[in-house]
């Protein structure tokens, strides 16, 4: 070791110096002599400060110091050789070895029947040693061959995010022509090679994009969160590819594999001299979803075609919507679609500035937003079953209660009159027929009754059935909606006068019909109708079916159904609601009924048309479950600026049911709709 040799050399020099000092000065004559009388001499002044004496004293001190230094050095040498030799050996080994990491392929994502929704593909990738960045000529030739600026080539080669000794990625997905030129002319491309690397592939294009999500380079925030995490999950490095949305993000710890490691020997300049032992990368686990690719495709195609027809025939500014299908018996999400959409393949290898600008523009309408779980809208008439249950539970209405609809309601006086959606009036109504024909007057009366009773029973009922809170689906970015009440209004409208901030009777009547400040998500309303279908029980919605074993055909994780909530309701009250919902499908409109009478299964459902401020057209709702007498599926659709629910969202729901039961809609009847 260099340090040991240095210490030995210093000790040797000091030893030689001491010998020289002894030879030269150690045998010199004494300072004092005796006179003839034999009396001992005595220095004047009682001290001896002659130059000869001072020199010898300094020499003695130097000898003592030298002995001390030699002792310290010998002790240090003993410590290094015997006590710390293992540590120094380790440091020496570290100085001459480096570890190069190898990225692991991510796990696949499959639908419930094993159809590949996400997999990996091989990418021909040009890589280069770090030294190539210093060769201007080589960088220029490589840039000309690949078709990118030389500055970009140099910048990529200087990127050491994967490790100082790792080969730097210059370009991915290069052509076979580029590979052939590099391999045929090694004298031009010293330090450059071509590797096959696994990159993400979404073989179905944009299918289920909002469920699947996409991947991208890990952000500084994600790295910081990972470094502070102690959950024992995968440890990340700068430059790693991770999930950024959807299932790719939600189940990142499962999909992300374990990176491999290759130990190499390097010289003083860091150049790789040889390769030592290594660990091969381990691919991530495959994930199987509850999604059915066939039903998903039908949902997306119907949503897109319905919106396109609305744009063409009615000149609506209608570009956005969503639909989802859930198994009411276990919470499985069978399909979930949102428009506008995108292709996750766009993000593979990094999204271009042009693509990102196209997605971020106002005209794009936020294609990355999953409107099925993050879109928030007034529920419109789809809330009326809950309003009816609130009135029945509070004793403000009974099965026999009757209401008279003339088309215009003046329950709070003529100055505060409100129209029913049917301006001609429905005539005599009950709770059940009020649901079937969506009569607003019935629910204005219920809202008024709650207001006069100074009760927030409607809000309490809505919250009991899950509104105003997240359903807990295993996807990121779910929103909770809003159930307004007097406290919320007072605290929200802080800029308004006190009388305007106070809860009014009109707030109650708006809330009763699903208008005003109420906000819900399509997922929340699907869960509400699933619970109605099940007699009050709703299972937690989820997209994960299982995590597959990496060896064999078994699973390592199987999703366990979880009861989200069970609302205790009087069975007679639920029967009123269910009969009213069946009536919506088969009695409300002959044109509407024609789209369901061509199915073998009986259907129950509800329409809705939500008025939204500053919107060119209302937002259309349709929610239904099937079979009505033994429910299996619930389907909910919401189309922004879609107009009446029966002339927009209803067609999407029917097409999804047609895919579920292989019973396509054959009716050509057009419904005028309701609210």
Image (tube, helix red, strand yellow):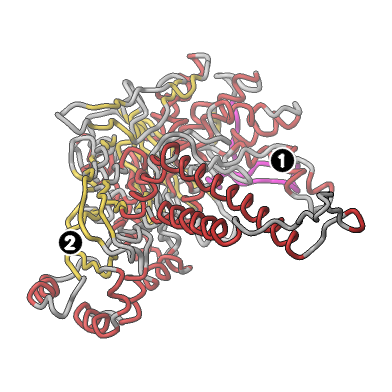
Q: Distance from label 1 to label 2 (Cα)?
A: 60 Å
Q: What is the magenta range?
A: 402-424
Q: Nearer the viewer, residue 370 or 273?
A: 273
Residue at 42% across, 70% down: 357
Furthest-top residue in this view: 571
Furthest-front residue in this view: 36
Q: Would residue 665 be seen by someone viewing this image from the given angle?
A: no
Q: Would residue 359 be seen by someone viewing this image from the given angle?
A: yes
| Front disc: 1 or 2 | 2
Find residue 656 and report its image quarter: top left
Image location (x, y in percent) of residue 234: 38, 41
In the figure, is residue 557 to the left or right of 389?
left
Q: Nearer the viewer, residue 577 or 195?
A: 195
Magenta stretch: includes residue 420: yes
Q: Tell me if mark 2 has few (under 14), some (14-19) or many (20+) residues whose alpha carbon lies within 10 angstroms of its own.
A: some
Image location (x, y in percent) of residue 107: 25, 42
Residue at mark 2: 195
- Whichever of callouts 1 and 2 sits on the residue coming sooner in the sequence is 2
Q: Which mark is residue 488?
A: 1
Q: Which mark is residue 447?
A: none
Is 559 above or below relative to 299?
above
Is 303 above or below relative to 579?
below
Find residue 155 and report its image quarter: bottom left
Q: Nearer the viewer, residue 662 or 606?
A: 662
In the figure, is residue 536 to the left or right of 549?
right
Mark 1 element type: helix
In the figure, is residue 257 to the left or right of 489?
left
Mark 2 element type: strand
Q: Tell me if mark 1 has few (under 14), some (14-19) or many (20+) residues whose alpha carbon lies within 10 angstroms of its own.
A: some
Magenta stretch: includes residue 111: no
């Amino acid at each position: 070791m260099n340090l040991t040799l240095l210490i030995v050399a210093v000790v040797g020099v000091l030893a030689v110096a001491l010998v020289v000092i002894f030879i030269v000065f150690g045998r010199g004559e004494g300072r004092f002599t005796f006179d003839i009388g034999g009396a001992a001499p005595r220095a004047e002044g009682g001290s001896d400060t002659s130059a000869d004496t001072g020199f010898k004293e300094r020499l003695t001190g130097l000898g003592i110091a030298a002995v001390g230094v030699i002792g310290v050095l010998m002790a240090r040498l003993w410590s290094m050789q015997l006590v710390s030799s293992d540590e120094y050996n380790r440091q020496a080994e570290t100085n001459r070895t480096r570890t190069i990491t190898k990225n692991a392929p991510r796990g696949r994502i499959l639908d419930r029947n094993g159809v590949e929704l996400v997999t990996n593909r091989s990418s021909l990738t040009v890589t280069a040693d770090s030294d190539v960045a210093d060769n201007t000529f080589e960088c220029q030739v490589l840039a000309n061959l690949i078709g990118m600026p030389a500055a970009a080539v140099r910048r990529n080669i200087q990127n050491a995010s994967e490790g100082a000794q790792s080969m730097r990625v210059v370009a991915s997905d290069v052509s076979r022509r580029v590979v052939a030129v590099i391999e045929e002319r090694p004298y031009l491309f010293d330090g450059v090679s071509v590797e096959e690397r696994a990159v993400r592939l979404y073989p179905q294009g944009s299918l289920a994009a909002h469920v699947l999500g996409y991947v991208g380079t890990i952000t500084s925030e994600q790295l910081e969160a990972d470094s502070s995490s102690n959950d024992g999950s995968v440890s990340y490095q700068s430059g790693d590819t991770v999930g950024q949305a959807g299932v790719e993000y939600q189940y990142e710890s499962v999909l992300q594999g374990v990176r491999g490691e290759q130990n190499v020997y390097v010289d003083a300049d860091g150049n790789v001299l040889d390769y030592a032992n290594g660990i091969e990368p381990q691919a991530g686990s495959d994930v199987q979803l509850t999604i059915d690719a066939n039903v998903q495709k039908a949902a997306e195609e119907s949503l897109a075609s319905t919106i396109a027809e609305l744009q063409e025939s009615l000149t609506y500014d209608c570009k956005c919507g969503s639909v989802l299908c859930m198994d009411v018996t276990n919470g499985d999400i069978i399909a979930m679609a949102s428009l506008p959409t995108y292709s996750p393949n766009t993000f593979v290898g990094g999204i271009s500035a042009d693509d990102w600008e196209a997605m971020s523009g106002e005209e794009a309408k936020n294609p990355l937003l999953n409107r099925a779980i993050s879109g928030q809208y007034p529920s419109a008439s789809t809330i009326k079953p809950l309003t009816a249950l609130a009135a029945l539970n509070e004793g403000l209405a009974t099965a026999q209660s009757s209401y008279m609809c003339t088309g215009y309601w003046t329950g709070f006086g003529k100055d505060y009159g409100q129209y029913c959606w049917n301006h001609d009036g429905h005539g005599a109504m009950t709770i059940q027929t009020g649901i079937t024909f969506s009569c607003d007057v019935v629910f204005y009366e219920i809202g008024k009754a709650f207001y006069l009773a100074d009760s927030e029973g409607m809000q309490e009922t809505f919250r009991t059935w899950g509104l105003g809170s997240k359903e807990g689906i295993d996807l990121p970015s779910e929103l909770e909606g809003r159930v307004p009440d007097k406290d919320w209004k007072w605290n929200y409208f802080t800029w308004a006068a006190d009388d305007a901030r106070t809860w009014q009777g009109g707030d109650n009547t708006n809330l009763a019909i699903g208008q005003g400040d109420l906000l819900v998500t399509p997922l929340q309303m699907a869960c509400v109708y699933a619970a109605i279908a099940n007699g009050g029980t709703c299972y937690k919605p989820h997209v994960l079916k299982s995590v597959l074993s990496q060896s064999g055909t078994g699973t390592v994780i199987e999703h366990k159904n979880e009861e989200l909530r069970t609302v205790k309701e009087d069975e007679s009250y639920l029967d009123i609601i269910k009969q009213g919902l069946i009536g919506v499908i088969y009695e409300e409109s002959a044109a509407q009924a024609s789209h369901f009478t061509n199915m073998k299964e009986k259907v129950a459902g509800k329409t809705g048309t939500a008025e939204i401020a500053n919107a060119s057209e209302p937002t259309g709702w349709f929610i239904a479950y099937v079979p009505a007498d033994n429910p299996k599926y619930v389907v909910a659709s919401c189309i922004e600026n879609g107009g009446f629910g029966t002339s927009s969202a209803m067609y999407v729901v029917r097409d999804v049911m047609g895919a579920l039961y292989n019973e396509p809609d054959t009716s050509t009847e057009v419904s005028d709709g309701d609210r």
